[in-house]
Image: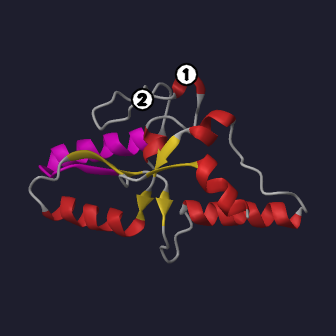
Amino acid sequence: MLTLDYGCHKGGHYVAEYPWVETSPRHSGGNFYYVQEDMLKDTARLHNWRQIVARPNFIIGASKGNFMSLATTIALYAQAKKSLGEKLTFPGNALSYELPYAHSIAKENARAQIFLATSDRGKGAYNMQSEEEVKWSDLWPQIAE
């Protein structure tokens, strides 16, 4: 996910400087995505292949057999809170509640990845996200309701 490429899963000083663009330097500290990217680059260079890295953001949408959708994560969190008899409170901090977030739509990701794989222009890394941005402060009350 796009946010993992830029260190959001680590937080603090590990997060890469914003805005996150494909040419941004890697965040500090280790990241298993970096190991995979380096292996891909080496193999592509060895075999004279094009190297393409697709970096989707939070994925919204159904994908059979894949539970990495943010909607699924929120649904599981909501069910756990309900089972505990608790209100569905936002799990982040005040800053993340007010920040605008872009997301990725599964079908759009698939179309973009097919294009990159079949086009001569596809090479390097691509951040993939919808142009629409939302704030949790607008969305969360609707989810909780």
Residue segment shown in magenta: 32-54
SS under mark 2? loop
SS under mark 1? helix
Image x and y of residue 140, in percent: 65, 54
At x 60% / y 55%, what residue is drawn? Answer: 139
Give the residue pinned by disc 1: 13
Image x and y of residue 95, in percent: 62, 33
**Which quarter shows the C terminus?**
bottom right
Q: Which of these two is toward me, 81 or 122? A: 81
Q: Is residue 32 visible?
A: no
How busy is the neighbourhood of tag 2: few (under 14 within 10 Å), some, or many (20 plus)? few
At x 69% / y 37%, what residue is drawn? Answer: 93
Residue 41 within the magenta-colored segment of the rendering: yes
Q: Which of these two is toward me, 135 or 46? A: 135
At x 15% / y 51%, what residue is drawn? Answer: 47
At x 77% / y 67%, what residue is drawn? Answer: 79
Residue 14 within the magenta-colored segment of the rendering: no
Give the residue pinned by disc 2: 18
Residue type highlighted by circle 1: His
Above or below, 63 relative to 143? below
Seen as rendered, the residue at the extreme bottom is 64
Image x and y of residue 125, in percent: 27, 44
Q: Quadrant of residue 88?
A: bottom right
Above or below, 83 relative to 100? below
Residue type highlighted by circle 2: Tyr
